[in-house]
Image (tube, rainbow, N blue to C red):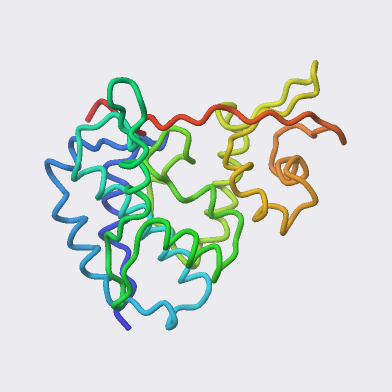
Amino acid sequence: MTQLNLAIWDNLLRKYVNDQGQVTYDSWKQNSLAELEQWLMNVRNVDLQGLDRQQAIAFLLNLYNALTIRQVLYQYPIDSIRPQVLGIPNWLTFLRFFTRSIYTLSGQSLSLNTIEHKILRQQYPEPRIHFALVCASVGCPLLRAEAYIPDRLTAQLEDDCERFINNPDKVRYDAASQTLYCSKIFKWYKTDFLTVADSIPTYIDRYFKDPLPPAVTMVYLPYSWDLNRCLSS
């Protein structure tokens, strides 16, 4: 098995991601695309079966986020991974972003969807991955400015949950109307969250800064596909 070395990827994140999860794609593309390519080349022979659960999840989260960034860098400058033509979303291009095979890992052809849905969600079920997988959009969780490290993975995922659920752009509660507004991530992956909680509000209440009442009305917020970019280098 290839040694799982995350140093290059970790350094790139620390250099090009700010504390708001925004990426300086322009500078990354100009100065360090080759480094990203090198890291992806270095780990192409990693055998998932040779990794324990924590190692596998951490590696797959890093791989997904790295491949997403590489796809954006290839196309940058762009405003969104969901381009528009005459104001109409180009759904075919958008879907291809997730479904097209873009990487080979130990002989297996991978798309972003394969990593998320066929490997992570099926083989390593863990609801908190949905606060760590970042598809380069504002509606996504904030990208961490560091790599996921197996020995620290639990703490990192817990921090991701706290940060996402206590971000009013993603989750907020209106006491007057007893309405819980939350990201569509909770709608799209409801079945995953319900493996560890009785309901979405119950799951959110574990991390939310203020206790939620027993009964709330849920409303899902619009999802922004705008690029999670930092305009200043």
- From what the image shows, is residue 86 above or below residue 57? above
* Camera-nearest residue between 87 and 165: 87
Percent x, y for residue 223? 50, 31
Q: For the C terminus, give its image quadrant.
A: top left
> How many numbered tags mark residues here?
0
Q: For the N terminus, give its image quadrant.
A: bottom left
Quarter of the rendering containing residue 113: bottom left
- From what the image shows, is residue 4 above or below residue 156? below
Quarter of the rendering containing residue 63: bottom left
Percent x, y for residue 207? 69, 42
Q: Identify the residue at the far right of this view.
A: 214
Quarter of the rendering containing residue 19: top left
Q: Residue at horizontal 42%, vertical 83%?
A: 50
Q: Residue at horizontal 77%, vertical 46%?
A: 199
Q: Residue at horizontal 73%, vertical 57%?
A: 196
- From what the image shows, is residue 34 above or below residue 87? below
Q: Residue at horizontal 29%, vertical 29%?
A: 79
Percent x, y for residue 210? 75, 31
Percent x, y for residue 118? 48, 65
In the picture, measured across the screen, residue 194 lies left or right of residue 54, that is right
In the picture, measured across the screen, residue 13 lies left or right of residue 216, that is left
